[in-house]
Image: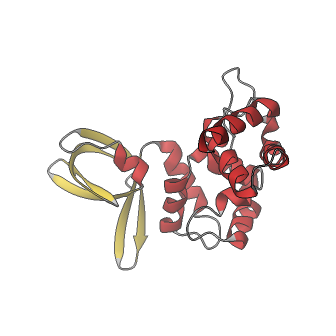
Amino acid sequence: MIASVSGVVAAVSPDGAVIEVGGVGLAVQCAPGTLAGLRLGQPARLATSLIVREDSLTLYGFADDDEKHLFELLQTASGVGPRLAQAVLAVHHPDVVRKAIANADTATLTRVPGIGKKGAERLVLELRDRIGPIAVGADGASGVVGAVWPEQVRQGLVGLGWSVAQADQAVVAVAEKATGSEPVPTLLKMAIQLLGRTR
């Protein structure tokens, strides 16, 4: 298996890149976030996962090993192939995906094109116990509030007059910034500040 590639970026397209390694150009499928970090003619290292099919060999590339491991874990769930797993990482940061699965936050998971409510519930059911540690705060405390905070923040925002859709968007945005150690009132305040800008 090709675990990583290091070389010069020879080409970049909307859905992938060519990394030249020892005179050989390797085509690597990448999510937009990974592609954004690549510069034509500059050296790059990508963690990779090789998907072997009867009629093809496809190399998927990631900014780091964390994304790669989550990409491979997602595919162990029934109905999830490499394209859907990559779509998840194109929409959400790995920590957001882990929190969503650990907290059974299907609203966040269904924001990924190709994942419906049943698919999101299946991901939670099959991966919840294997998703790994949720983002740890700077003081080393694990995200204990993680199990309940999204719903509490969502309810708080709806109670304050925002729509469910706005509340869901704010929860996703806060999840991307949160370390997992903040108390719920702090997370609610972050969400209100974010929504204040969009009014």
The percent coordinates of residue 133 (x first, y second) are 69, 40
- x then y, percent, for residue 30: 38, 56
> Residue at coordinates 69% horizontally, 52% vertically from top-left?
166
Expressed as whole percent of the image width and height from the top left, the position of residue 5 reads 32, 47
Quarter of the image where one finds residue 144: top right
The image shows a total of numbered marks equal to 0
The residue most toward the top is 139
Front-most of 185 and 133? 185
Location of the N terminus by quadrant is: bottom left
With respect to residue 9, does 77 lie above or below? below
Residue with the most extreme bottom position:
55
The residue lying at 67 percent from left, 56 percent from top is 108
Would residue 53 be visible to someone looking at this image? yes
For residue 139, what is the image quadrant?
top right
Image quadrant holding the C terminus, namely top right
x 42%, y 55%: residue: 31
Task: Tell me if 67 is positioned left or right of 165 in this view.
Answer: left
From the viewer's side, name the closer residue of 137 and 116.
Answer: 116
Residue 184 in the image: above or below residue 27: above
| Image coordinates for residue 77, horizontal then vertical, percent | 65, 66
